Image: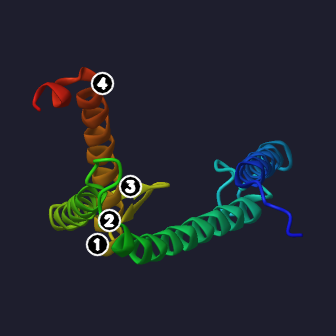
Amino acid sequence: MKKKVNVNNWQSWLKIGLVAISAVVFALFWLVGYDMPYEEDADFNAPLLTDVLIGYVYLLTAAAVGVAVFSAIHGIRTRSRQGGVENGVPTARINTITWIITVLLLAGSFACATTEPIKVNGKLYSETIWLRLSDMFIVTSGVMILLAVIAVAFGMSGYSRRLK
C-alpha cells in the first residue's frame, strides 16, 4: 500500500530548512572574518566568506529560475485542459495579461534606462549594458510593486464587486 505524501508537510520543512540555512550563511558571513581589510585599499573590507555568500545566492537564484521554468511549463500543459476559467475567475486571461505587462515593462524600462556612468568604490563604472540592465530591473521591480499595491487596494475596496 502506497503511503500518501503530505505536500504541506514537506513544503513547510523545506521553507524552515531554507530559512535556517540562510540564517547560518548570513550569520557566518557577518561574524567570521568580516573585518578583514581589503589588500589593495585598507579603507575597504574584504569579508572572508564573501565567496560562500555569493555562491549561496547563485544557488538560490538558479533554483528559483528552475522552479519558475518548471511551473510555467506545468501551467501551460495543465491550463489547456481546464479551459482557462476556475471558479468563475478567468485565470488564463489574468495570466496572459500579467505576462504581457511584465514583458512590456522590462522592454520599456530597458529602452529608457540611463547609461550615465556612476561612481562605484571611487571609480567610474561605464559598462552601458550592465547599467541598462540594472536600471531595468530596479524600475520594473518598483513599478510591479506599485501595481501590486494598487491591485490589493482595489480588491479590498469591494469596488470590483459593485461593478457587476
- Residue pointed to by mark 3: 119
Name the secondary structure under disc 4.
Answer: helix
Mark-to-mark CA distance, 1 and 3:
14 Å
The picture places residue 90, in percent across and down from the top left corner, at 25, 54
The picture places residue 71, in percent across and down from the top left corner, at 50, 69
* Circle 4 or circle 3, nearest the eye: 4
Q: Are marks 4 and 1 in contact (CB under 8 Å)?
A: no
- Residue pointed to by mark 2: 131
Mark-to-mark CA distance, 2 and 4:
38 Å
Picture residue at 23% right of the left edge, 29% below the top: 154
Q: Which mark is residue 156?
A: 4
Crowd rating for badge 2 (residues with CA inside 10 Å; few <14, some 14–19, many 20+): some
Q: At label 3, which amino acid type do we have? A: Lys
Q: At label 4, which amino acid type do we have? A: Met
Q: Nearer the viewer, residue 65 or 109?
A: 65
Picture residue at 20% right of the left edge, 68% below the top: 107
Q: At label 2, which amino acid type do we have? A: Leu
Q: At label 1, which amino acid type do we have? A: Thr
- Residue pointed to by mark 1: 128
Mark-to-mark CA distance, 1 and 2:
5 Å
* Circle 2 or circle 3, nearest the eye: 2
Q: Report whether residue 36 is seen.
A: no
Name the secondary structure under disc 2.
Answer: helix
Q: Report whether residue 119 is seen.
A: yes
Relative to 148, residue 117 above or below:
below
Picture residue at 29% right of the left edge, 54% below the top: 140
Does 132 sit left or right of 119 as displayed? left
